[in-house]
Amino acid sequence: MALDLKLFDTLAADNGRPKSVTELAAPSSASPKLLNRVLRHLAATKMVRQTGDEEYAQNEMSKYLEHPKYREGICYLGFAVCSSDAGGPTLNKMPEFLSSTEYQNPEDTNNGPFQYAHKTPNHWAWLEQHPRVLQAFQDFIAGCREDRPNFMDPGFYPVEEHLLEGLRYDGDAAAFVDVGGGYGQALAEFKKKVPAWKGRLVLQEQESVVQIAKVQSHASIIEPIVHDFFKPESLKGARAYYMRHILHDWPDKECRTILRHLKNALEPGYSKILIHECVLADRDAAWQHTALDIYMMAAFAAQERTEREWRELLSSVGLTVTGIWSKGVGNLSLIEAML
């Protein structure tokens, strides 16, 4: 509702000076009385700051939501997870779903809280049928990358030693492959932060996503190709196969399928699988990780994983964890695996 009312944009106008509810209502022609009721609640929940009677201004949270990529999370989470669209709110329905299963851990990607709430067999098929929400999902995921430590940053993962040194330039061996990488934003960031990279930057995605990737501003520096990661990997012996927030979308069974296909494409001693995901602590886990774990259970019948769970998953398909790099609390780690 706040997005529809253009509240965050209007609050930001004129250098963010405090504004009356009448001013804030003008762009949407909404009732000032209604808007005051909404803003009063947003102030109580620390989304905006109340500066006077029927007067409001930005705070840190509303400044954050000035940026479209961040606030797209509200659209995605609102429609796909929290709203009543298509049959019921996922999070509200989750206790009912878990009760119906006698509180078993959800591990069926076609039978979880999301499917129960939305009366649909598949989360991804539902997104394809709701292009506005799919766009919001892609933008939200891209926005989550910003202002967070990235494995490409100095002092995180040894990019030069592990990727640049020994890089071959013949065919697929020269490729850094982003598997399921959305519109290729991570590849564009990699090129910017690792200018010494002279190899190929390959994006693998579904057909509908590839078509959008081809018109992005960075399209000229990447190679978008259509690929389903549940099918055999078409690029053999690449330098690296990178996945960010892919495996946490799937239960272990599906993850093993994805990983086996990548394993079969690896060149021993040269190729690496880079998994950019949360690594949950066994004790005193970060709230960012535990909250995301509950969300993944609700949306995908999937999960975040501890270091032990990651090692067991990778070992189960014949892969060896050769390193785990982390930076800060509540951020993503980078897991490197090889044959």
Image (cartoon, rainbow, N blue to C red):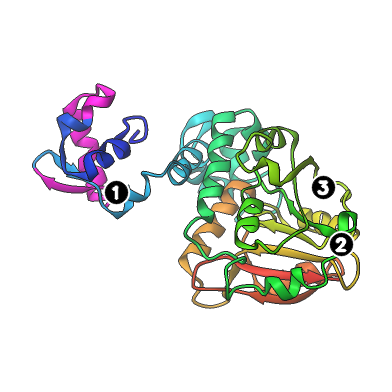
Q: Earlier in the sequence, mark 1 or mark 2?
A: 1
Q: Is residue 74 magenta?
A: no
Magenta-colored span:
25-52
What residue is pinned by disc 2?
A: 263
Disc 2 on helix, strand or loop?
Answer: helix
- Seen in the picture, residue 22 relative to 272 is either above or below; the reply is above
Which amino acid type is shown beneath numbered disc 1?
Answer: Met
Residue 121 left/right relative to 23:
right
Instruction: Residue 255 in the image: state x and y as whole percent.
Output: 76, 57
Q: Residues within 10 Å of mark 2 (few under 14, many from 20)?
A: many
Front position in the image: 68 or 137:
68
Q: Which element type, helix, strand or loop, lies under badge 3?
A: loop
Q: Quadrant of residue 40?
A: top left
Q: Amino acid at mark 3?
A: Phe
* Residue 147 seen in render: yes
Which badge, 1 or 3, is on the more N-terminal residue?
A: 1
Residue 105 visible in this rendered orientation of the protein = no
Which residue is identified by label 1? 47
> Real-space Cα distance between discs 1 and 2?
46 Å
Q: Which mark is residue 339?
A: none
The answer to whether 37 is drawn above or below residue 338 in the figure is above
* Residue shown at 44% from the left, 41% from the top: 68
Disc 3 designates what residue? Answer: 230
Work out how far the residue at label 2 is from the one at label 3, CA to CA, in angstroms.
13 Å
Residue 213 in which image quadrant: top right
Task: Tell me the quadrant of the picture where the C terminus can be found.
Answer: bottom right
Q: Residue at x 68, y 43 (%)?
A: 111
